[in-house]
Image (spheres, coloured by chain):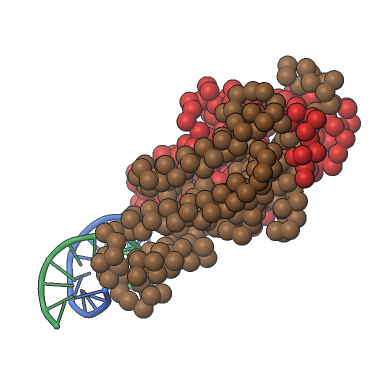
Chain colours: A brown, B red, C green, D blue
Amino acid sequence: MPEKILSTALELYLSNGISAVSMRRIAQKLHITAMALYRHFPNKDAILLALVEQGFTVFGEYQYRALAGKTAAERLLLAGKAFVDFVVENPKIFRLIFMSPDIFQKVHNEGSVGIRAHQTYQFLLDRVADGMREGFLKEGTNEEVARAIWGLCHGMASLYVIGMLDVQESEFRAMFMSAFLQMGSGILVDATLEKFTV
Amino acid sequence: MPEKILSTALELYLSNGISAVSMRRIAQKLHITAMALYRHFPNKDAILLALVEQGFTVFGEYQYRALAGKTAAERLLLAGKAFVDFVVENPKIFRLIFMSPDIFQKVHNEGSVGIRAHQTYQFLLDRVADGMREGFLKEGTNEEVARAIWGLCHGMASLYVIGMLDVQESEFRAMFMSAFLQMGSGILVDATLEKFTV
DNA sequence: GTCTATAGGTGGATAGAC
DNA sequence: GTCTATCCACCTATAGAC
């Protein structure tokens, strides 16, 4: 039953945002009363917490697909593709776990969620460290490169999910990978690099 | 008086998020009753709309500083710096105008806000077109480059604002510019580029 | 321009019966 | 495990007096 409560809460969030998630509405969808929910969860925040944790689990499933790659380069590329897949197939979950500061304030300090969030970054950091070891990434600070990649992925996804890129799902995949590759090869004509860094 | 209402609404949003913005609370802070607000705005959504428009005005002031640059390269770099400045100095406004899908749904189709949002992208697109004309950016599609830059900036800022980068303001500036420059020169060793694009 | 009175709604949560 | 009854806080908004 706790699972049905969570999936219903997720369904409500997915269709109408966080303000649509209320004890009464969850109960209504399950054809029970709101008070019955308290037999399974101590309060509403506990439901939100479990919901976010579930979201991270879904994300983790995509992320770990990248480990199927045989080289560090392939694994990083697959990580990028897994990320687009996740975003395109679960845009609302992306919003839930990465774009909901209001929920974060309630839930992010709960330990478990903070750990999950950190793991997603650690995964990318490992891919970057692998890449430098294998020599296909330029030498540099792991963190700086990882954060730039993370920022790019997060930003492209956020703009898409928020509706600021006027594109459909299929276009977005291409657009995302284009940005990913631009980060790889750079956008500057080398000769003018010093102009840029002034 | 409408200005005092807006600044109070902004203050409430800045300190406690969107759920803290209510007619009652705005009125309370102004030492009037909630009903008096309806003399100045027809309803709450009108206040939120005006608030978002005000946010875009603040953002626009930062953005246009970049036009002081004498070359296209300098203007693009200044645009990046202006963006960090805006984010560091107005993190909550950033959240309001670029990271609040719930508000967007209410307000983004109101025409005026949609136009403002589009202008911010157009500004970047112009910088990129300038850069290609001047020859310091690689030849390519304006839109692809602009969206990659936008995604990177938006993503770094979002992660910072949401508290996912464990850094202070000063560190963030350096981190942001580092990511900006990585986008410029690329993170890949050229020889292995084809591996990456598989 | 601001007020009171009030309607009509949302929400989370406790107590206690079955 | 689920129910009813109920409390209390909070919200937007209308009508109409001053």
As displayed, is residue B166 above or below residue A89?
A: above
Residue found at x 60% / y 24%: A141
- Residue A55 seen in the current view: yes
As displayed, is residue A30 above or below residue B196?
A: below
- Pick the residue in front: A25 or A186: A186
State the quadrant of the C terminus of chain B: top right
Return the x and y of residue B95 as percentages of the image width and height. 53, 42
Q: Is residue B64 left or right of residue C6?
A: right
- Pick the residue in front: B124 or B15: B124
Could you tell me how many numbered marks the image carries? 0
As displayed, is residue B51 above or below residue A163?
A: above
- Residue B119 seen in the current view: no
Q: Is residue A157 left or right of residue B45?
A: right
- Pick the residue in front: B18 or A179: A179
Return the x and y of residue A66 as percentages of the image width and height. 62, 47
Extreme front residue here? A70
Return the x and y of residue B162 as percentages of the image width and height. 49, 39
Q: Quadrant of residue A21?
A: bottom left
Return the x and y of residue B189 as percentages of the image width and height. 75, 28
Q: Quadrant of residue D10?
A: bottom left
Residue found at x 77% / y 42%: B197
- Pick the residue in front: B49 or A155: A155
Residue found at x 52% / y 43%: A120
Q: Is residue A20 left or right of residue A124?
A: left
Q: Is residue B126 left or right of residue B23?
A: right
